[in-house]
Structure formats: C-alpha cells, structure tokens
Image (cartoon, helix red, strand yellow):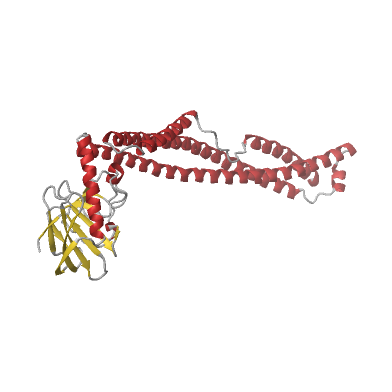
Amino acid sequence: MILIKKIFLFLALTTLLIFSAKSIWAQTVTPTPTPAQDKSQQAKEIQDKINELQNKVSDLQGQAKTLSSQIAVMDNQIKLTEYRIDSTKAELLSLTVDIDTADKKIVVLEKNLSELTKVLINRIIATYEVGGTQSFEVLIASSNISNFFSRLNYLRIAQTHDKKLIYDTQQAKVDYANQKVIFEDKKKKVEALKQQFEDYTAQLNREKQGKQKLLEDTKGNEANYQRLLAEARAEYQQIQGIVAGNGVEVEIGSVNQGETIAAVISGASCNSTGSHLHFTVSRNGSAENPFNYLKPVDSTNDSGGDTFNPSGNWDWPLDSPIEFNQGYGDTWFVRTYHAYSSHNGIDISGSSSNVKAVKSGTLFRGSYVGNGGCSLRYVRIHQSDDGLDTFYLHVNYTR
C-alpha cells in the first residue's frame, strides 16, 4: 500500500513538475548576445558630416596662410568638434537603452533560473523517493497489464524530461553569464564615452578661445596677421641660433639659485610684441620641455588653450602668479600662424619683472642679431649640478 502511494505521488508530482517547468521555460527568453545593430540614419548622417568636415579642414590647412583662411579652418574645426560631441551623445543614448534592456533581461533570467533550480531539486527528490522501485513491484501495484505499461511509459517520460530540465537549467546559466558580460562591457564603454565627451567639450572650449584670441591679436586685420607671422618667424630663427650656441656671449660669473639675473623688457622689443620672458631648457644644444623641470604654480592661461602641466621641482624664473602665454612644442600659436614647426620653450609673464636663476651655475650675458637686424638680448646659465643650460630671453641686463 505504501509502495502504491509512493508511485502515485511520484506520478502526480512528475505531471505537475513537467507542466511547471514548461511554463517557466516558456517565459524564459534565451537572451544570447545581441548582434550589433546597423547605425541609425541619424548616426550615419553625423558620421558623414564629420568625414566631410575633416576633409574640408585638411584642404583649408593646405591653402596659403592668411587670416581669412585660418579663421575658416577654425570655424570648420569648431563645427567638426560639435559634430563629434553630437555623435558621442547619440552613442551614449543608444548604449543607455541597451544597458537598460540587458539589465531587465538579467532580472528575468535570475528569477527564471531560481525557479528552474527549485523545479530540478524537487524532481531529484521525487526521483530519489521512488528510485528503488523495480519493474516487478510496479507490476504488482498495477491493476492490469495495460496499467503496468502505462506506468512504465510514464516513468520513462519523466526520466527524459529530467534530462531536458537539466539541459535547460544549464542553458539558462550560460545565457545569464553572457548577459552579465554584455552588461559589464557596455557599462565600461559608457564610461569611456563619457570621458570622450568631456575631452571633446574641453577641446571645443579651447577652439573657441583660440579663435577669440586670434581675432583679438589681429583685430580682424590681415596686415596685423601677416606682421605677427613675420615677427614670429624672425624670433624663432633667432632663438634657434641662440640655443645652438651662435649668440655673442660674455661670462659674468657664478650665480646662486633664486638670485636675480635680469629684468623682463617692458613693452615691445626685438621680435617681441609685448612684455614676456621666453624660457628655454637645453641639453647639449637640444631644447627640452621646461614643464618637466618646473614645479606646479598658481597661473592663468592666456595661450589660446596650450597645456599647462609643470611636474618638476624647480622654482620659476618669475614671481607667481604666472601668466602663461605660449607652451612648449605643438602650441596654439604654431597651429594658428604656422610660423614654425615647434616652440622650443615657454612664454610667460609674472607679478614682477625680476628674472631669477632657477638653479645655481655660471651666468652668461648674450645677444643675437638675426632677421630684421635687431639684437635680441638674453642671459644663459650653465647649471653646475646637472649640466643643463637655461636661457632667459627678451630681458635687460642687471649684472
């Protein structure tokens, strides 16, 4: 009698579990990794515009260097950056929707996986309870031969369903893992796009600032643009000659770090349109980035958007706060005026005109006559502890 109850209990539970599992699995959408969708029409139009503007900027940069052509380059570069910002925004929005979809799929999968696991556990328990039932015992418990074969067939169906249920549960686990990976990858891409968006926004601000500075410097006049261009080329030739050791120099003597060695010329001077100090660091006649040596300092940036990133430990040659006029290397001025390929120092102003030695060494007073016939005055210190030379240009001698 106990055996018969067990069998009937098993068969009833099997029927219930079969339908329960089918119901659960029917609700389980198998969310395998979604293939990348084609770009939307809007995204394609934005990308086409970006490509068009990139080509236009390249064409304009190859034209003769005039104020009007440079303003055209800047206008198109600004538009290009704006389209890149729009493209990044659209991609961020699309990813946000994808993440929301993946998140919902993960929630459904977690629920269905939990329910499938419960069904499987109950099936294992039910199978265990009748696991010792032999065919002969089933025969004894059957009312007739037809009933006997029906019960055996029922048991085989239940065993087959067990195998499918195990497979389905395993598949749900795989799909769950896939969705988790997709979800995490998309979240990482969102963070990268957010950083890209911030970079493009900062770039756009620099480009607008650069255009404004160009208009202020030239007052929108082509003659002013060409004059500044010629002066920049002349200054560059003189500075190159000075760093190469072609200036006329007189040794003054030893100086200590922080000692006043010169004064910035007030107003315009030889190949300089206004008061500033050109500071160059050189090793064996080859210029190096001064920001690698100078320490962080209070400053304002009037360079048109050049990077100001001092990371060394030297004191500055001028008292802070520093007004930053032009950086090192590929600067805004280089890209705007095309007077030379790279700026070999930095242009700065300070709260006073006193120029100080950044390191101890031997002081030299020098001058260089170059393009235009004017004499550009400077001082140089050959530093005693590291063998570097530091140059201080556009100055009056104080020693």
Q: Is residue 79 above or below residue 252?
A: above
Q: Toward the viewer: 254 or 65?
A: 65
The part of the image, by quadrant, that contains residue 143 is: top right
Rendered location of residue 220, percent (x, y): 21, 34
The part of the image, by quadrant, that contains residue 47 is: top left
Rendered location of residue 392, percent (x, y): 19, 58
Instruction: Give the position of the C terminus as an image quadrant.
Output: bottom left
Q: Is residue 80 above or below residue 129?
A: above
Residue 157 falls left or right of residue 286: right
Instruction: Give the position of the N terminus as an image quadrant.
Output: top right
Q: Is residue 294 visible?
A: no
Q: Toward the viewer: 134 or 160?
A: 160
Rendered location of residue 130, percent (x, y): 77, 48
Q: Toward the viewer: 368 or 95?
A: 368
For the point 58% across and 45% down, which residue is it? 178
For the point 82% across and 40% down, which residue is it? 153
Q: Toward the viewer: 266 or 371?
A: 371
Q: Is residue 270 above or below residue 38?
A: below
Residue 104 falls left or right of residue 25: left
Rendered location of residue 235, percent (x, y): 22, 50
Q: Is residue 255 above or below residue 25?
A: below
For the point 34% across and 37% down, which residue is it? 63
Residue 309 falls left or right of residue 379: right
Q: Is residue 88 visible?
A: yes
